[in-house]
Image (cartoon, rainbow, N blue to C red):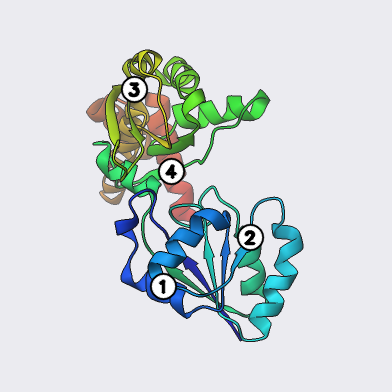
Amino acid sequence: MGTLYLVSTPIGNLGDISPRAEETLRSVDRILTEDTRRSRLLAQKAGSKAPLVSLHAHNERERSKRILSWLSNGEDLALLSDAGTPLVSDPGGRTVAGAIESGHRVVPIPGPSAVLSALIASGLPSERFAFLGFPERKGNKRKAFFERVALSNETVVLFESPRRLVVLLDELAEKCGHDRQGAVARELTKVHEEIMRGTLTELAAHYRESVPKGEVTLVIAPNEQILDEAAQAVEARALCNDLLDRGMKPSEVAKEVAESLALARNEAYRIVHELQRSRNSG
């Protein structure tokens, strides 16, 4: 049974390829890649003699059967995207799922990622984040996308085309608030790497005057109000539990919590009743 290696590749600077990635490219029987022209340079740098096989969004369904037959014949394969970590807003998901279902070993070879690079350089909270890929282009899906970002209690990371960046920033500022913080990471690891930080309105104004070029990753701060509400809810539940453990009546607990945390009385009652139901069912 062959092994399918998911090899992360440089997002711009060829020096970022790992020794393990190079060793893997040298050892496999074939290299599956979105763009054979770009990956050929990387394969040559690694000293790989393996043939390159085109695998992209338009041929993956048809090519997956052949890939599974290669694996079944004992061949080891490497799967690459154009740049960065495979499958992240790139093809390959069908191939990986098919390999797993057929019992083949799937091995990740970690490495460069535009998502993580932009996140850690943004200056925004990185403990919890959501990667949403490319924004929806129109209709109700785009409306739902903006609502998702606006109400997010975690940092959001997006990809976007440079020619659509200003439009996206303007819409995000309108939906999320003009003071919402963000960062635009452009041409990461390359000679003209740029990371701009500021409010969504400031970023839109900057790129309206200075037309962006190259690969763009956008990072958006979490909704601070929702974060505050979530923290308050956690504190309220902890206090309710403590007071109930002391034997206080539910009505007294709700009143005490509402007054102590400046919480609406009906919200305090809701939390108390939820905790009581949980205790009774347990």
Alpha carbon distance from label 3 to label 1:
47 Å
Asked where in the image residue 118 lies, by quadrant, the reply is: top left
Tags 4 and 3 touching, CB below 8 Å: no
Mark before the other along the chain sequence, 1 or 2: 1
Q: In which quadrant will I find the N terminus?
A: bottom right
| Amino acid marked by disc 1 | Gly
Alpha carbon distance from label 4 to label 1:
37 Å
State the SS at label 4. strand
Alpha carbon distance from label 3 to label 2:
41 Å
Mark 3 or 1, closer to the camera: 1
Q: Which residue is mark 1?
A: 47
Q: Is residue 185 left or right of residue 123?
A: right
Task: Look at the picture and state if 10 lies above or below 179.
Answer: below
Mark 3 or 2, closer to the camera: 2
Task: Look at the picture and state if 138 lies above or below 72.
Answer: above
> Residue at 43% across / 37% down in the picture?
215
Q: Which residue is mark 3?
A: 180
> Which label was assigned to residue 130?
4
